[in-house]
Amino acid sequence: MAGAGENLGPEPFSSIPPEQQEELKAALRKGNLEAVASKTREVLGNLDKVGLNIAVTGIAGSGKSSFVNAMHGLDDGDKDTASTGVTETTFKPACFPHSQNPNVIIWDLPGIGTPTLRADTYLQQMQFDRYDFFIIISCTRFTEYDIKLAREIQGLGKRFYFVRAKVDQDLDNERRLYDQSGCLKKPSASRPPQYDEAVILKNIRDNCNGNLETGGMDFQQVFLVSNWYINEYDFPRLQETLLHELPSHKRLTFLRSLSNLSKETLKEKKNYLMDQVWLKSLASLGASVVPVPGFATERSAVLLVTSLKLYCQDFGLDKDSLDGIARRTNKPIEELRAVIKSPLAHEITEDLVIKLLSEAVGGAVNYALVFKNILPIACPVIGSAVSGTVSYNTTYTLLEGFLNDVADDATRVLEKASK
């Protein structure tokens, strides 16, 4: 197992808002372990409250509501999903918090272009300042209303993304023009003689880009998605783009809400969560030792139980998430459960944490590397004090090991579900 600090990124404070960074550094300089632990718990509590509001808009029938459901990893008709239909079903902003991460809220906005919802007043009516970014959806071509709205968003300094939905339907429609061997039934100068999905998708993308250029938009990425097959086409790339363009302190909030569509997503989750292991370990400092002498306080035990359960949920290792994967992939849940080696979220108890802590005793931690990487501002006194604290050592070892285990399990589940 790697020593503490070996997995830290170059800026371990980057996920913490600047003002809280300074407060934590000030506590570290003073050298009081209990104060450091208290301030760290406060920082962690604030990080757990970081909100993210995503606006989804477009004309009626473009697939907005289904897209909202897909972003939450839900199928249309599941509990707490956005209403869908062939006519406009949204007449005012509808709020849909993520079922496991309610700090992430997707807002299904009414379709623009009606007499009461004009592009020049739409953002004010929809409370523009509420949202972190906008997703503009179309299932055909982007209209003048979409382009006007994009200009308004751009002028007010927020990000927006063009999403072309229902590409699976376009591919199905094209496929009907070809026979079972993939040959075009009737010759056409506008279509290749052999069915070629890549060519069709390129034509859709080129058409959207040409449409936007005609409307006077500078070059914009257009993401081609299916709300039913979220692991295909540009859906994973869209999620990665949204993640990387968010402010650093909001990335983990968004990342924890994402479905595990790819190994890249799982790797991102693991890396971001690993950067917080040192914070959770600092939170274990400075108090009496119950129930494992020398290793954890009662408060620390609660923190660990909560952390391990959240790791399971973040990586889809809870009953609801596994049920959803099994349903979407038509895999028996027993097959998915069989590749999981770590406990599921509901199986994590304080007794299990005590057992894991006992196993973590003696785990090697390179404290010199820890303080070189994450606490360069800490004076030698606090560095020496923490390096002699068994609770930091064992907490770090436990969290790091468990996080590695659940990430590996999630990868195996993804591989099994993809077969």
Image (spheres, grey):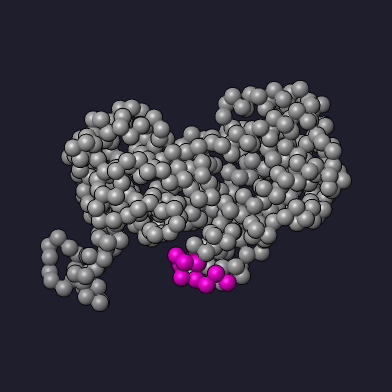
Residue 298 picture quarter:
top right
- Left-right relation of 114 to 239: left
Q: Quadrant of residue 343?
A: bottom right
| Rendering coords of residue 299 (x, y %) | 75, 41
Q: Main secondary structure of the magenta part?
A: helix
**Residue 107, percent from left and from top:** 39, 42
User: In this view, which residue lies farthest toward the right?
Assistant: 293
Q: Was residue 167 drawn as part of the magenta stretch in this picture?
A: no
Q: Is residue 274 above or below residue 323?
A: above
Q: Is residue 247 visible?
A: yes
**Residue located 61% across and 27% down the image:** 20
Q: Nearer the viewer, residue 206 or 223?
A: 223
Q: Residue 381 sits in which quadrant?
A: top right
Which residue is more in the foreground, 152 or 82? 82
Which segment did they paint magenta? 325-334
Residue drawn at (45%, 57%), measured in percent from left and top? 79
- Apparent side of residue 207 relative to residue 394 in the rendered image (left or right): left
Q: Is residue 75 left or right of residue 35?
A: left
